[in-house]
Image (cartoon, rainbow, N blue to C red):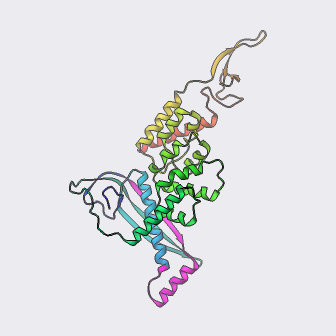
Amino acid sequence: MKTNDFIITVTNNIEGYSIERYLDTVCTNVVVGTNLFSDFAASLSDIFGGFSNSYKHKLELIYNEATKELKNKAKNLGANAIVGFSIDFDEVSGGGKSMFMVSASGTACAIKCNDKDIKQIEKSGVVSQNFIDFELIRRFIIKSINSGSSIKESWKEFLYECPQKDIVENLINRYKKDTYVDLEEKSFIERYLALLPKLDVVDILYSNYLESSKEIGTLIKKCNMFSSKHILEIIKNNTHLGIALIDSKSDFYQEEDLYFMKEIIKYIDMLPNTGQIQMVKGGFLGKDQEKYICERGHKNNKDVVFCETCDINIKGLKREEVAIVEQLREVVSILENNL
């Protein structure tokens, strides 16, 4: 393992490294159902002796899935290690059915190499055939997808188990096409991107948003890819398209998120008025009156907040946009009290 690899350990410290920051406790639960055949195979092993390969396979499957989910959660916090890793297996059964359940937890942290003598780990001088087979499959799948091939079911299983950021841009380009009709593949893209560390996805997602706001906006929200920094940049370019992303979500929030959320609110509060309050003649023998005139020229009583014709306020924001911004203020308040 190279010194910049993500490290997961059951110990509370890592030899040769110092823990700079403890970020948060991370945990995950994975449940996999057994089926009639695996249960039958396992029962034969219990009767005649030997190992139950069917159960062994399921245990390995959920172990790997739980570890992968825990690692992704930690990466989204900015961690490069998990210490105090713990994992528990259990079987839940009843009514002739059973399920395997695994719970994994640990402490996400940022570590730094503090041993000057550790520059790199020497290569072992041995490469296994399993590694070569894995690498051939990985390269073939990446090359095929980036060349435009439809995504096969066997590839999906591989990619769920071993996410590859080299195909992210291609998948996003597929998703945003107006002519996209393969709903099954679209569903795969949504699930797959949600598995990846946020940093591997957000830059590409948001750089495509202004071009394909409907499709990319949907993807941002379904994958919990809220990024206040990117949203602020979009709001400065197109206020309405940027506000449409404010109610998206993230799995975790940090000080940087809070800072840019505040900047978003500040920017929106300082938007210039697109409508105006002005005196309007009252007609024949009528008194002049102050009216709120929206950006589209509709006249309203001056105390009206939203135009009664087009439902926009004096800054040109729709009622639902104002509600989204107000919700952001509440989120900021919660984060200020807890970060």
Residue visible at 67% across and 14% down in the picture: 279
Observer-nearest of 55 and 281:
55
Residue at the extreme left: 117
Return the x and y of residue 81 as percentages of the image width and height.
35, 57
Residue at the extreme bottom: 48
The quadrant of the image that shows the N terminus is bottom left
Residue 151's place in the image compared with 336, above or below, is below
Residue 300's place in the image compared with 43, above or below, is above
As for residue 30 lying within the magenta part, the answer is yes
Viewed as shown, does residue 136 lie left or right of 37?
Answer: left
Return the x and y of residue 75 as percentages of the image width and height.
41, 54
Return the x and y of residue 166 as percentages of the image width and height.
47, 54
Question: Bounds of the magenta span?
Answer: 24-53
Return the x and y of residue 286 as percentages of the image width and height.
76, 11
Residue 304's place in the image compared with 79, above or below, is above
Residue at the extreme right: 284
Residue visible at 51% across and 87% down in the picture: 44
* Observer able to see residue 103: no
Residue at the extreme top: 285
Residue visible at 57% across and 61% down in the picture: 151
Observer-nearest of 81 and 84:
81
Q: In the picture, residue 83 is in which quadrant?
A: bottom left
Viewed as shown, does residue 89 lie left or right of 189?
Answer: left
Observer-nearest of 232 and 339:
232
